[in-house]
Image (spheres, rainbow, N blue to C red):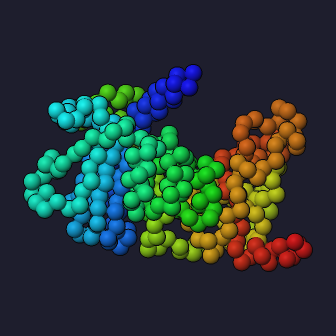
Amino acid sequence: MAAATNRNRDFRDAQRRKRDEFYTSMSVIEDELQHYTRHFYGKTVYCNCDDPRESNFFKYFAQNFEALGLKRLISTCYRSQNPDVFHSASMDSNSAVYIDYTGTPGAQELGMEHLEISSLEGDGDFRSAESIDLLRQADIIVTNPPFSLFREYVTQLIEYEKHFLILGNMNAVTYREVFAQFQGDNICYGPSIRSGDREFRVPDDYPLNAAGSRVDDKGVKYIRVKGVRWFTNLDFDGRKTELALTRRYDPLGFPKYANFDAIEVGKTRDIPMDYGGLMGVPISFIDHYNPDQFEIVGSSRTLGSPMSEIAPKGTYSPGGPRFYLPNGDGTYRRMYDRIVIRHRRRGNLYEKSKGV
């Protein structure tokens, strides 16, 4: 029974990975990495979701190995992403591969195809013993991990106390494990992507059934993915800039939720400068979060009371934990995810005025 369960899990993981097999463009990598060059001197970088001859992450660090002053560059992948390229007498066509690069003299002149690539004993899963052993040896992890396994992936990085710069969906901030890191000012979004979508190359057998997908004149497939953001615990210039506020509090303009004592602020730019209580703001607020200016108290996924305890059935749209606003006619509308914040300094004055 245990063996069957493991096989089912492996099959599900393989299916998820196939859907998550996005190749990040060099321009997306370069636009973000330029903000962190000072962090890499003398460090070991590990790209643990990257086929070394397919991945632009590996290519970026190999090409800039000396300029960044790297000590070591490791790249591993979940089985071979391109069996035809890697097949050899010493390497099974379905094997997971890796490279351990230390700035081989002449490698740049010979070209990437001359770098020595080896097989891992296992499947290259980032959770495998082999991958974790390499993770322990690394200083900074930089990659595009499987979006469907993002929660588990970040949890591992936190457990092993690693610095990282990774791509993910911006809504991952709502995951309990990830949100706790944002709340503690241990993770932030990177600066180079704020909104819109990004294009990724996908495998030849990837189904193109989404808007924005295309095939170029060489038959290479691409899809556009919405809500992509960089997640990092590395510092960068301009990370903690105070948000300029211009709105003042007006009870009519900032209604209170029905199931939590906080006001609704629909846009980050509308945060009132003079309100000291709790405020629900969109998750895009994270881009402007300065822990010296604001405190993150929690989120609508954990703080709101069940509407079943507040309003009759049929007066609200059921669903997972969220905040609700009254419509004024005895019904309630369910809001998108909200982060609950308060002014760091004004909030203290507000509590004192209420006798808290």
- Quadrant for the C terminus in the image: bottom right
Left or right of 162: which side holds 346?
Answer: right
Please, is residue 105 above or below residue 14 in the view?
below
Q: Choose top left, top right, bottom left or bottom right for residue 214.
A: top left
Q: Nearer the viewer, residue 88 or 3?
A: 3
Left or right of 268: which side holds 232?
Answer: left
Q: Choose top left, top right, bottom left or bottom right for residue 237.
A: bottom left
Percent coordinates x, y for residue 187 in the rendering: 54, 62
- In the image, what residue occupies the spot 73% across and 50% down? 302
Percent coordinates x, y for residue 336 in the rendering: 66, 46
- In the image, what residue occupies the spot 34% across and 67% down? 43
Percent coordinates x, y for residue 294 in the rendering: 66, 70
Percent coordinates x, y for residue 240 in the rendering: 53, 73
Please, is residue 211 above or below residue 259 in the view?
above
- In the image, what residue occupies the spot 46% across and 53% down? 229
User: Do we see residue 46 in this rendering?
Assistant: yes
Count all numbered tags in the image, as a single digit.
0
Q: Nearer the viewer, residue 290 or 45?
A: 45
Left or right of 284: which side holds 167?
Answer: left
Please, is residue 60 above or below residue 148 in the view?
below
Q: Nearer the viewer, residue 172 or 155?
A: 155
- In the image, what residue occupies the spot 47% across and 49% down? 168
User: Do we see residue 142 in this rendering?
Assistant: no
- Quadrant for the N terminus in the image: top right
